[in-house]
Image (cartoon, grey):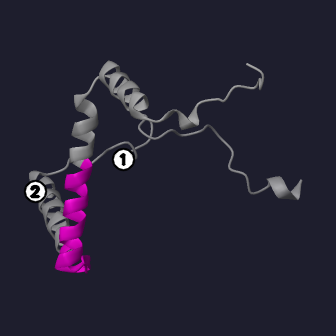
Amino acid sequence: MADYEAVQRGPLRLKGSGGALGAGKRKKKKAKDKAQILEQIVSSKKQEEEKKRGLDKRTPAQVAYEKMQEKRQMERILKKASKTHKQRVEDFNRHLDTLTEHYDIPKVSWTK
């Protein structure tokens, strides 16, 4: 029973209820606070951009290489997207027709 002696007795008091004096009141934000918050956000974005520029330690050749890779990838995507499935199947069949018959399955019977 000694453990329960420190327990507060009585009804629960909720925040924001009319019974508690001053506990439920909130301060209104001023326009100055909003302006300061906006300024901080803008300044933090500028700082992040400056950090990105400073952290980019690639050589000009590396930057050019990556740009060319992206350009070639876009060309491949556009080339693949230009043909329909039917056109791809027709091209594949034409390719198979040009191949030699070396890869065909040979006959099993020796007598015929």
Q: Position of residue 78 (x, y in %)?
A: 22, 38
**Residue found farthest to the front:** 111
Would you identify the image quadrant in which residue 80 lies? top left
**In the rendered structure, does residue 55 fall within the stretch colored magenta?**
yes
Mark 1 vs mark 2, CA separation in Å: 28 Å
On the image, the x and y values in percent for residue 49 come to 18, 68
Regarding residue 5, the answer to whether it shows in the image is: yes
Tell me which segment is drawn in magenta: 52-73
Q: x, y percentage for residue 82?
A: 22, 30
Between 57 and 75, the one nearer to me in the picture: 75
SS for dot 1: loop
User: On the rendered structure, is 89 left or right of 45?
Assistant: right
Q: Which mark is residue 35?
A: 2
Mark 2 Cα shell of 10 Å, populated few (<14), some (14-19), many (≥20): few
Q: Nearer the viewer, residue 12 or 96?
A: 96
Circles 1, 2 touching at the beta carbon (< 8 Å): no
Q: Amino acid at mark 1?
A: Gly
Q: Which residue appears at 13% of the width and 61% of the height?
A: 42
Image point 59% across, 39% down: which residue? 12
Q: Residue, x 17% and y 78% (percent of image)?
A: 60
